[in-house]
Image: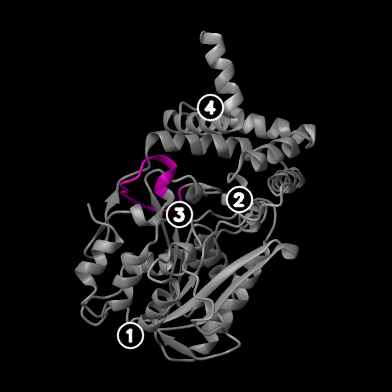
Amino acid sequence: MANIHDYLRWRGDLTFEERPFNDVDNLILSAFVYLDFTGIIPTQSQGGSITLREACHALLAKTGGDVTPWVRSLAKIDTPFVELVGDSRRFGDAQVGAYADVVDKRRDLQFAAMWVDLPHAGTYVAFRGTDTSLVGWRENFMISFRVTAAQQEAVKYLAHNIERTGESGEPIRVGGHSKGGNLAEYAAACCPKHLRGRIAQVYSNDGPGMAPEVMLHSPRMILGDRLRLIVPTFSVVGMLFARKNERRTYVASTAMGIEQHDITTWQVLPNGVEEEPELNPDCLGLNEAIASWASKIPLDERERVTHELFDALQAGGATTIEQIVESPEKVQQVLRALGATDDRTRRITKELVQRVASSGMDVVRNAASKTVEGAGRRLRGPKAKRAQSEKRG
């Protein structure tokens, strides 16, 4: 079984003249944009560009060889990936520029992007998916009831950078993973028509769709076959707000359950992804449960629940997902805040959990059970252990 690391070993020495751009090249660039290149790749206002090789070498020097703290994703992007992509003939000479990385709590905005000019393969505009910030995750939920600030930024960013290429005639591809895929879809569908015609391909790699109440006409209706939706066989994020009978490519993964969302677990071949015929049956059950639950909640209710939930998650001062679970005290603060939310919020949250639990999802239930048990042990601490010991005695 091979992943994007293996592909870079197989194809890294081949230029795009020798082997044309394919789906796996798209996955690599969607993973690459998750790296924090602040101060390395020039911003749009600074202008100019550097080679992708220079960017990788500068990041490795800056991090002392461990890029983990500079990965803005839960995906397992690592130092070998940076070394392989930077040292490859295929990507190393590409020019990268217009780096953007903004988190604005006041606007509920988390947005990051860059463009990559590939030798003999046109331009790829890459949008970053959700990082680990709570602002980013709040914004993920907000796509269920409104156009988000990140989507608006993506339209402006894409339009500006299509204009940058002038009338070169080179293909322009747009893509991203998770929320990045959603931004790619939305930006391509909503950019001015005279610019939209220059887009050759749009990739959404396990990215959520558009709520029909927010966007009546789907990106597929606007973009047609130029829109390529790629999801793992256990896709939850990428099936949110999925339109009926929408064409997707299903890709094999080495992970189990919802961990298949990690793009580094997807299986690839020398010229494309390793395709599967359909979604995992267990995944279908979960997606149907979530879709059924969400369809019954009006937009104003979705908005209120989202803000109450994330206000509770941030109650202890946490700004990232990791900070919420870093100590029992922070977990308790979140639980207390959730307990103080509106009765309807608790009811809706409880209903979702019940729907998931009743959908026959052993994978999800087992994972949730382990998480709850682990949190319980952390919260009970030594006092509970002494009580159990006394009870046994």
- Residue labelled with disc 1: 93
- Residue labelled with disc 2: 323
Do we see residue 60 in this rendering?
Answer: yes
Residue type (three-letter) at the residue carrying disc 2: Gln
Residue 43 lies within the magenta run: no
Q: Quadrant of residue 109?
A: bottom right
First of labels 1, 2 by sequence position: 1
Residue at (47%, 80%) from the top-left corner?
198
For disc 2, the neighbor class at 10 Å (few under 14, some 14 to 19, many from 20) is some
3D distance between C-alphas at marks 4 and 1 = 50 Å
Q: Secondary structure at mark 1?
A: loop
Residue type (three-letter) at the residue carrying disc 3: Asp
Q: Magenta stretch?
A: 245-260
3D distance between C-alphas at marks 1 and 2 = 38 Å
For disc 1, the neighbor class at 10 Å (few under 14, some 14 to 19, many from 20) is some
3D distance between C-alphas at marks 4 and 2 = 27 Å
- Residue labelled with disc 4: 357
**Tag on residue 206?**
3
Residue 258 lies within the magenta run: yes
* Residue 332 left/right relative to 82: right
First of labels 4, 2 by sequence position: 2
